[in-house]
Image (spheres, rainbow, N blue to C red):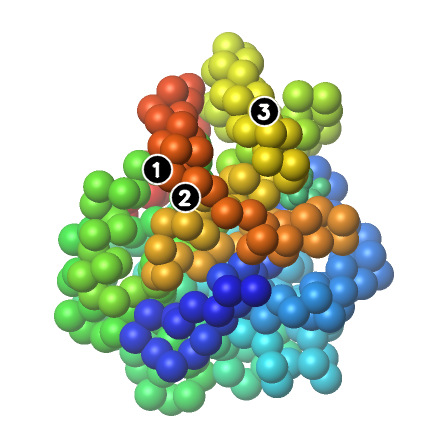
Amino acid sequence: MQARKLGGTEICLPAIGLGCMGLSEFYGPPTDKATAIRLLHEAIELGVIHFDTAEIYGIRSANETLLGEAFAGKREHLFIATKFGPTRDWETGLRTGIDGSRKNCRCAVDGSLQRLRTDVIDLFYLHRVDPATPIEETVSAMGELVSEGKVRAIGLSEAAGDTIRRAAAIHPISAVQSEYSIFARDIEADVIPACLEVGASLTAYSPLGRGILSGRFMNESLDDGDWRKSNPRFRGDAYAANLALAKEIEALAQAKGCATAQIALAWVLAQGDHVLTIPGTTKLKNLKTNLDSYQVVLELNERDALNVLADLVKGERYDELGMATIYG
Ligand code: ATR
């Protein structure tokens, strides 16, 4: 286990947490409740402390509700992060926009606290920057929640470097959550320097490239209804090209005698002490593999070989609509 400090705080966290989104939505059908709760309990037993969720994960925020139920009586030593901002119509499930207003911030935190069955959220992120609300307004509202004791620390997700700096001028930003992996290094030019400047941790989500970096999709196809089927990196020629790149990572894993997913996570962990990561899984076996990534050390030449792959990846991180909400 590697412990890392959450930006600007004395809070120490294992570098690997658990991204909980996939238990409720997006990557195929939701995991049934008993199995999901069992996995969350097993994660705690294996030493996972940091659990990441969001208001928009699962119909009617089912993912937060799930965590609330799973963590009842176990909350004390856990670190729970959630996010607000994007809105959905819960009848259709469709996204309706992003609301970073003070009013929505206050309303969202109360909903999350209730569903998570807790009186404090350890890390409360703005999930996507609202172009219609100045970041100063959003962050000052989030800062009030810290003063009131509803939230311990605040963060931003998929924010641009300048937004991070403007936000940090209003209230300390403890973490910035962005997609970051061997296949997704676009934040290195703008976002990571801003994180280092303001002392925020970088929480790397989708460190396994949504699963492609585990090598599994060379032998496995995506279910109908899996959100990845509409992701540009998982479609057509781009998908074939990206799988060929994943094969190179698999070859390195075979040479080192470890799992392909562990190479992907070891690469993220090697980026520095400011990085935390939250790989998502619904399976105990994969969770154990991911936690064992702490043991995998990449040599400089191996990292150099991996470092060139992001430039060869085909397809954007999101479809057009999704791309419009990042670098906010
Ligand atoms: P996200 O942050 O969006 O959850 P990710 O962490 O990059 O994305 O990848 C999550 C995907 O990788 C999930 O589909 C997960 O599938 P399972 O729920 O079946 O585990 C898959 N995944 C996670 N760890 C894995 C591992 N060690 N081997 C194979 N697949 C893995």
Neighbour tally class for label 1: few under 14, some 14-19, many 20 plus, Cα within 10 Å = some
Estimate the spatial distance between the alpha carbons at disc 3 and disc 2, rounded to whole Å. Answer: 21 Å
What residue type is disc 2 on? Answer: Tyr
- Residue identifier under label 1: 185
| Residue 164 visible to the viewer | no
- Residue identifier under label 2: 180
Task: Identify the residue at horizontal 40%, vertical 72% (top origin).
Answer: 5
What residue type is disc 1 on? Answer: Arg
SS of the residue under disc 1: loop
Estimate the spatial distance between the alpha carbons at disc 1 and disc 2, rounded to whole Å. Answer: 6 Å
- Residue identifier under label 3: 251
| Figure quadrant of residue 35 | bottom right
Task: Identify the residue at horizontal 58%, vertical 53% (top origin).
Answer: 295
Q: Is residue 182 above or below residue 34?
A: above
In primary-sequence order, the first of circles 1 and 2 is: 2
Task: Identify the residue at horizontal 35%, vertical 37% (top origin).
Answer: 185
The reply to whether the C-beta atoms of the residues labelled 1 and 3 are less than 8 Å apart is no
Q: Residue 306, how many percent across, how many down? A: 42, 31
Neighbour tally class for label 3: few under 14, some 14-19, many 20 plus, Cα within 10 Å = few
Q: Is residue 256 above or below residue 105?
A: above
SS of the residue under disc 3: helix
| Figure quadrant of residue 126 | bottom left
| Figure quadrant of residue 111 | bottom right
Q: Residue 114, how many percent across, how many down? A: 59, 77
What residue type is disc 3 on? Answer: Ala
- Of discs 3 and 2, which sits in the foreground? 3
Estimate the spatial distance between the alpha carbons at disc 1 and disc 3, rounded to whole Å. Answer: 21 Å
Q: Of 220 and 152, which appears nearest the observer?
A: 220
- Of discs 1 and 3, which sits in the foreground? 3
Q: Residue 22, how many percent across, how many down? A: 64, 48
* 181 relative position to 65: left or right: left
